[in-house]
């Protein structure tokens, strides 16, 4: 079950007011209502990991640079597959042949760079995979990211908390205006948002044993309109 760490209230509400992002087609019969936005943050452990490993080769002859780079990449791929990485989890993400350095200055020959991105479900084994790739000849390792593949698994709980947030805010505003709060007239889900790349790092040799996947925060929100009753006469 997802671990809920916080419920945040977005102060975006006003009595008898509206914003373009909120539903406009649910007015109260009396024209008296309050519009609010409620949100809730649910934290989930990541179930996917993605990272890139690459080999850069420099040679005065472009053909030798290309062939030499290919042999090194094959060794890296073999090492990853020996650790359980499947072919469908591997994808060439960059292949570059250049006679210039990254800063634009002329290179002492030809630079061939080949990067492969690994994407898989087993986030726990990423350190071992990176070590295997580096040992096999990879001289680049970066773009490490952990993420939740399907944030919708936390949707029910997130929406429950977001609605509770909206209702509590509406009660507060109605009390401040000294008016009774009526029923919900309209509730619209807002897009869930979070940081899909919850843990991004540049990696170097010897750093694989300090990798921590952490958790990803996914925020759910609802726009709601509540009726306002008629204040009691004194």
Image (cartoon, rainbow, N blue to C red):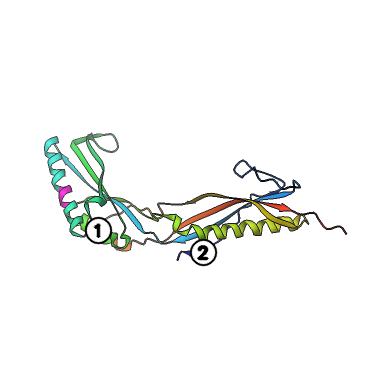
Name the magenta segment's main secondary structure.
helix
Depth order, front residue of 88/127: 88
For the residue labelled by badge 2, is the local secondary structure a helix, a strand or a loop? Answer: strand
Residue interval drawn in magenta: 72-76
Could you say which disc has been placed on residue 102 in the image?
Answer: none
Identify the residue at horizontal 24%, vertical 58% (top origin): 129
Identify the residue at horizontal 76%, vertical 47% (top origin): 30
Picture layout, residue 82 above or below residue 19: below
Image location (x, y in percent) of residue 18: 67, 44
Label tally: 2
Q: Residue furthest front?
A: 29
Q: Is residue 102 left or right of residue 227?
A: left
Q: Earlier in the sequence, mark 2 or mark 1?
A: 2
Mark 2–mark 1 distance (CA, rounded to whole Å): 31 Å
Image location (x, y in percent) of residue 93: 27, 43
If the image is split into quadrants, where does the N terminus sit?
bottom left
- Residue 162 in the magenta stretch? The answer is no
- Quadrant in the rendering for residue 45: bottom left
| Residue 61 in sight in this render | no
If the image is split into quadrants, where does the C terminus sit?
bottom right
Reading the image, the residue beneath label 1 is 129
Picture layout, residue 126 above or below residue 72: below
- Quadrant in the rendering for residue 49: bottom left
Reading the image, the residue beneath label 2 is 5
Image location (x, y in percent) of residue 188: 58, 49
Identify the residue at horizontal 73%, vertical 56% (top origin): 174
């Amino acid at each position: 079950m997802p671990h809920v760490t916080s419920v945040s209230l977005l102060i975006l509400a006003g009595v008898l007011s509206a914003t373009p992002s909120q539903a406009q087609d649910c007015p109260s019969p009396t024209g008296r209502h309050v519009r609010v936005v409620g949100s809730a943050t649910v934290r989930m452990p990541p179930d996917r990991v993605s990272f890139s490993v690459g080999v850069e080769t420099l040679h005065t002859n472009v053909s030798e640079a290309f062939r030499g780079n290919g042999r090194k990449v094959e060794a890296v791929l073999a090492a990853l597959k020996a650790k359980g990485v499947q072919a469908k989890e591997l994808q060439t993400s960059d292949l570059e042949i250049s006679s210039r350095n990254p800063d634009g200055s002329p290179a002492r020959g030809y630079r061939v760079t080949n990067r492969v991105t690994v994407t898989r479900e087993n986030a726990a084994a990423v350190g071992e995979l990176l070590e295997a790739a580096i040992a096999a000849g990879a001289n680049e390792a970066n773009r490490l990211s952990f993420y939740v593949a399907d944030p919708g698994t936390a949707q029910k709980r997130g929406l429950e908390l977001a609605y509770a947030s909206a209702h509590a805010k509406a009660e507060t505003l109605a009390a401040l205006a000294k008016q009774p709060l009526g029923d919900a007239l309209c509730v619209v889900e807002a897009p869930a948002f979070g940081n899909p790349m919850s843990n991004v790092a540049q990696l170097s040799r010897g750093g694989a044993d300090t990798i921590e996947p952490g958790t990803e925060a996914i925020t759910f929100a609802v726009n709601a309109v509540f009726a306002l009753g008629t204040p009691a006469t004194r």
